[in-house]
Image: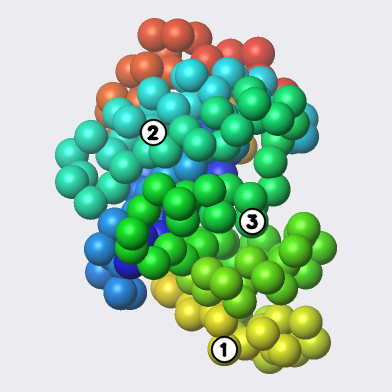
Amino acid sequence: MIGVFIGSFNPITQGHVYIAESILQHTECTHVMFVPVSDLYGKASLKVEDDYRVQMIRLAISGYENMSVNTIEIEMAEQLGRQNKTIETMYELRKQYDEPLVFIIGADNVAKLHTWYKAEELVSEFGVYVISRDGIDVEKLIQEDEWLNKNISYYDVVEEAVNSASSSEIRENVKQGLSIDGLVCEAVKQYIYEHQLYVEECV
């Protein structure tokens, strides 16, 4: 089984890598695939081009044989002229891989999942690993949310190994000239400084 971890990864943090490690250790997944969103993703803070974000992911996971990066969302955006929907990405990935796929989402986003395009089809077709983070009681959240509870059989909660800084905190640290040691791997840190990323970033 392959875990599909979609996000802006702007930049990829040590926390993202720890999440992938947790998925590999505590679920049936034997591989985790990082899928960065395209530059057309509608997020104000996404000012670093996808080429940089892809390269930082490659640097962060270079020592892991069971992690990879897939640029399908970037390629699809070039073809469609828009950021594609998550379920579109999952179906396209299904065509590429023989193994079952499962979608990975953070606890901070699961409450909004019902607003996503074809959300019910997404969870029923692929299943969801929800990463428990930021002190959120995911199981309680699912129990108390009518839509989530209705689809409860499709979720598995995975405890995050380590709580660490978010991408936005790292961008703010760089902007203010503060240390990002330990928040990203050494190779990513050097890449950020070398290319002067996030120096003018607005969080």
Considering only order in the chain, which callout, 1 or 3, is on the residue closer to the N terminus?
A: 3
Q: Nearer the viewer, residue 80 or 159?
A: 80
Is residue 40 found left or right of 19 in the rendered image?
right
Considering only order in the chain, which callout, 1 or 2, is on the residue closer to the N terminus?
A: 2
- Residue at 55% in and 28% down: 75
Res 60 → quadrant: top left
Res 7 → quadrant: top right
* Residue type for callout 1: Ser
* Residue type for callout 3: Ile
Q: Which residue is under mark 1?
A: 153
Specify whether residue 36 is in view.
yes
Q: Which residue is under mark 2?
A: 57
Under circle 1, the secondary element is helix
* Residue type for callout 2: Ile
- Residue at 57% in and 89% down: 153
Considering only order in the chain, which callout, 2 or 3, is on the residue closer to the N terminus?
A: 2
